[in-house]
Amino acid sequence: MGISVDTFFLERNGQGTLQAQLQQLIAEGILSGRFHVGEKLPSSRKLAAHLGVSRITVTLAYTELLANDYLTAKGRSGYYVSENAPVPPTYAPVRRDNESVDWDRAFARRFSDGDVLTKPSNWRDYRYPFIYGQVDRKLFDHANWRLCAVRALGHKDFHSLTGDYVDQDDPLLLEFIARHTLPRRGIVARPEEILITLGAQNALWLASRILLNRNRRAAIEDPCYYALRDLLIHSDCQLSYLKVDREGLLPDTIPDDTDVIFTTPSHQCPTTATMPVDRRNALLSRARELDAMIVEDDYEFEMSFLGAPSPALRSMDRDGRVIYVGSFSKSLFPGLRLGYMVGSEPFIREARALRSLVLRHPPGHMQRTAAYFLSLGHYDAQIRRMSKTLQRRREAIEEAIKQYGLTVAGRGMLGGSSIWMQAPERIDTTKLASDLQRQSVHIEPGEPFFSGPNRPQNYYRLGYSAISSARIGPGIQQIAETIRQS
Amino acid sequence: MGISVDTFFLERNGQGTLQAQLQQLIAEGILSGRFHVGEKLPSSRKLAAHLGVSRITVTLAYTELLANDYLTAKGRSGYYVSENAPVPPTYAPVRRDNESVDWDRAFARRFSDGDVLTKPSNWRDYRYPFIYGQVDRKLFDHANWRLCAVRALGHKDFHSLTGDYVDQDDPLLLEFIARHTLPRRGIVARPEEILITLGAQNALWLASRILLNRNRRAAIEDPCYYALRDLLIHSDCQLSYLKVDREGLLPDTIPDDTDVIFTTPSHQCPTTATMPVDRRNALLSRARELDAMIVEDDYEFEMSFLGAPSPALRSMDRDGRVIYVGSFSKSLFPGLRLGYMVGSEPFIREARALRSLVLRHPPGHMQRTAAYFLSLGHYDAQIRRMSKTLQRRREAIEEAIKQYGLTVAGRGMLGGSSIWMQAPERIDTTKLASDLQRQSVHIEPGEPFFSGPNRPQNYYRLGYSAISSARIGPGIQQIAETIRQS
């Protein structure tokens, strides 16, 4: 029996080359059991005519499937589904209409109750996306990233692509971070003092798990990055909230029984305040007094386009009590999922062991690609290009905010990629955001960043890393008008 | 001032093209502060002659660095280090010779005390690598993986490469697993019932954290995968150990107060026993009786080259009490770090929230590449090729074991990629492994797989997924002789 050409159907706007789409179509037909062993495929001429593709495309797809043992060729008579092709499922699945598990009993812990900022998945279609932490296609050096990735896919890098690192990291990436990235933050670290993590979130989580338990107290900034608060709540520790002013947290307000202080000195999240050197020294003294550890999230230090970044806390720390967290999510792209932490060797040893238990290691291919991108200078070039653009956008947003009479609650003195805003007290920015959504404007309500029972509802964040300068003014105008009418 | 050509030096056997190496050299010279703003680079003619490369190579490297703003060109006079090039570090790092942190006090938990199998990092240089779970270069379809990765690096996939999925996964990969992979295990699952994880290890860890706490009891197989035991120990739960026979764990021996049962029915790790369908039914009944959850690690089901794999426990479960864990580490490569878990929707919702806290999501690029590799049929073709080769190796190892009089303790009836061996009682296989190492033979001592205080020391594991058939006989002979002489 032959397979009719009518069962073949290429999707409009399908992904990949026509050959790949066709190959996929046939493979799926076999895998799903629609095409059976011994059935004859349509001739390349017929199928090409039916699909409106060139005959060579069909022939190439058939040849590839022949090499993969999906098809066999019988002389001139054509291509057939091979005996060696994978077999379709043979088990009749059980119906589970009435599951009997009592989930309230089964769960030892629940994790799905945290604050989340809901980013609309179609934010790219928004006319005014004041979204935070997403990549602007025009700012990312996609072409060179691709070249580096292709190099990392080559034969020489076979082991770094495929190998089980167990608890280790890519030595090239470690070395580059130690020799080039950290020295710019004033940090000297040997490879044994660095761990590659699956983004900054992963680093913060590892630190919390090692340094905290139910008998210990962590102090965090208020407002702060909600995902940090969420992970600390789930680490079962005691929590103190530290108000921040325009220079970040106030060291005097750290409670006496604090074991670990989490802070974002470069750009406080979300107020974008930069902590001056004096206050950094005061923070280190206070930590020494308490014998507390500090976890420094060196958030957005790369975005210091308005002035040189201050040295990292870790670079000023003589005791070894600062754990430094860096990330490539903001400077490269969030989907990369690569960050790093720096700490004294005993700490990194524990973090490495814990990471190995939880996930082993970040994929070697992502590490090697990043190592190439960094070492070829593309990273620095990109940061410079980004900084120039962000600076222009920053000027545009400052001007528009002034023009339309909105109120800034916090802006990074050195740069950053967002501004922290305050609406009149009567405004609930969660509702405001949803009203603006209907006008194709995305803003981030501020409430999830605050802790405790009476959270202010009139703050919001405006990101300017994914919106063009030209759109900023009209977008701000929409926000101002919507606030006025609310 | 000109930069002398003498400061340029290409490493022999350096990685990447000559142009990339040269570019890297110059970028690093600038980043490290060796080359200063305004300094003139050697002419392309001079530098090409000095390095023994073609002049066009040097020119291309210069042009690329010009585009990246590292260099500027001044008419005909040549290339100079640009004013816009990144600046070298300006902070003098603090010395930390005498760190004062008391780590015994600082650590809330320690993780670095688990059992580890130390795999020599140079195992690829071993003549007889009976190593487990590493990729044989000859068995992996590197060329097609690369093609799929390049496709996933293209413009159409820009968002799946760079985007922040927050707590979501690549819809293409989820759909393929739901439609094609799981049906072969008899499992029907909607995308909401599937979570992509950073390998099986990550899935097991997520399950343990959701289902267990200090008041709950987990039952695990003995011997078992040591990294599973290690992560359960660190989850603070109570632990029971279940002896296994040639058909896996014995359901009757599961203690009455058990909350979660961890099992590897396809190929018990490390004995490779396959659990027959009768015993699977008995296990499900016992779990229902106890109202216990089951975590099924469907370990190496793809390696069933000696017979069709048995249906997964999850496919036989009417209650929704089985959490299914699958992985691509063995069938593709461990460095991929991709696995998946299937469970009822309330469970996957919690697992997704926890994964988001700990690491957000596996990198989009790895997910998309795997989706292409699977959907184009390369995955199934590779499994079939691998199975054929593993079958030949299995025959070779069985024959050699017989010929040289070694004792098998467990072998997979359906296949697998290792054999579980028993040496005479007097032999400590940890010492044996180190003796064999000097003869370029790698075996895995069995002690770490066992639990409790009196762990047998005379078992070992022979992997045959990374050693050629031709080497197997002589390798086994070496092992037999070394045992005889011990």
Image (spheres, coloured by chain):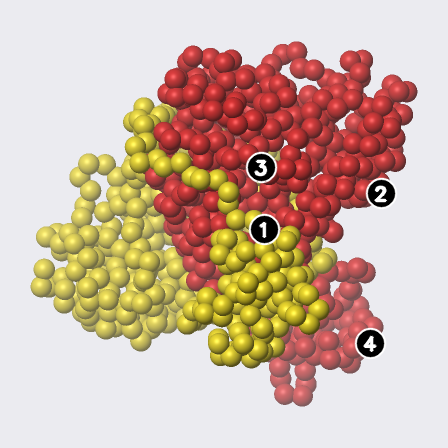
Chain colours: A red, B yellow
Q: Is residue B478 left or right of residue A298?
A: left
Foreground mark, 4 or 2, reads 2
Gap between marks 1 and 2 measured at Cα: 28 Å
Which quadrant is home to the N terminus of chain B?
bottom right
Disc number placed over residue A309 in the picture, else none = 3
Q: Disc 1 residue type?
A: Pro
Q: Is residue B61 left or right of residue B460?
A: right
Disc number placed over residue A222 in the picture, else none = none
Say which label, 3 or 4, has the lower sequence index. Answer: 4
- Residue holding disc 2: A470
Q: Disc 4 residue type?
A: Ala
| Mark 3: few/some/many CA within 10 Å (<14, 14-19, 20+) | many
Q: Secondary structure at mark 3?
A: loop
Gap between marks 3 and 4 measured at Cα: 63 Å
Q: Disc 3 residue type?
A: Pro
Q: Foreground: A184 or B204?
A: A184
Using the image, name the chain to which the residue with label 3 belongs: A
Say which label, 4 or 2, has the lower sequence index. Answer: 4
Q: What residue is rendered at 67% in x and 55% in y?
A: A141
Tags 4 and 1 touching, CB below 8 Å: no
| Mark 1: few/some/many CA within 10 Å (<14, 14-19, 20+) | many
Q: Secondary structure at mark 4?
A: helix
Residue A426 seen from this side: yes
| Mark 2: few/some/many CA within 10 Å (<14, 14-19, 20+) | few
The quarter holding residue A71 reads bottom right
- Residue B434 position within the rendered picture, expressed as x and y whole percent measured from the top left: 19, 57
Vertical placement of residue B60 versus A144, above or below: below
- Residue holding disc 4: A49
